[in-house]
Image (cartoon, rainbow, N blue to C red):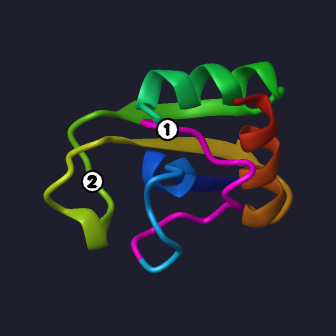
């Protein structure tokens, strides 16, 4: 298993790819938050190792939206699609 960091901005439909969205618009949601991501990850069978609401994505340091640290063996792309499908 590998620890991976996930930020809510990866799933925000209002952001462009340059602004930090990492999934397709069809998989993105409006205003994702940390608790919603944690619930989606848990429902997809992913172990959530840590939640930290005081952290922010380095490119969006002003947003203080938090982050999840999850334990996942596959690639980060697989992980993002799994969480997005559970959202």
- Residue at the (19%, 62%) spot, across then down: 61
- Quick one: which residue is furthest to the left in this view? 62
Q: Quadrant of residue 37 in the image?
A: top right
Depicted 69 relative to depicted 76: above or below: above
Q: Quadrant of residue 42 in the image?
A: top right
* Residue 1, numbered circle: none
- Residue at the (66%, 57%) spot, across then down: 25
Counting from the top left corner in percent of width and height, residue 70 is at 62, 42
**Do tag 2 and tag 1 residues touch (Cβ < 8 Å)?**
no
- Which numbered disc flags the more N-terminal residue, 2 or 1? 1
Depicted 73 relative to depicted 34: above or below: below
- Residue at the (52%, 54%) spot, across then down: 5
User: In the image shown, does 23 or 48 lie closer to the viewer?
Assistant: 23
Q: Which numbered disc, 2 or 1, marks the residue closer to the eye?
A: 1
Counting from the top left corner in percent of width and height, residue 10 is at 53, 56
User: In the image shown, does 58 or 51 lie closer to the viewer?
Assistant: 58
Counting from the top left corner in percent of width and height, residue 21 is at 53, 64
Task: Identify the secondary structure beneath mark 2.
Answer: loop
Q: How many marks?
A: 2
Range of magenta residues: 19-31
Q: Residues within 10 Å of mark 2 (few under 14, many from 20)?
A: some
Counting from the top left corner in percent of width and height, residue 74 is at 86, 59
- Residue at the (49%, 49%) spot, across then down: 12
Q: Name the residue beneath numbered marker 2.
A: 56
Q: Is residue 32 left or right of residue 74?
A: left
- Quick one: which residue is furthest to the bottom in this view? 18
Task: Identify the secondary structure beneath mark 1.
Answer: loop
Q: Name the residue beneath numbered marker 1.
A: 30
Q: Is residue 16 left or right of residue 85?
A: left
How far apart marks 2 and 1 lie (CA) works out to 18 Å
Give the dominant element type of the magenta stretch: helix, strand or loop: loop
């Amino acid at each position: 298993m590998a620890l991976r960091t996930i930020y809510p901005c990866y799933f925000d439909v209002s952001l462009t790819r340059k602004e930090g969205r990492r999934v397709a618009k069809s998989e993105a949601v409006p205003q994702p938050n940390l608790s919603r991501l944690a619930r989606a990850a848990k429902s997809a069978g992913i172990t959530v190792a840590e939640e930290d609401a005081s952290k922010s994505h380095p490119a969006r340091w002003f947003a203080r939206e938090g982050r999840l640290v999850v334990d996942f063996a596959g690639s980060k792309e697989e992980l993002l699609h799994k969480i997005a499908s559970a959202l």
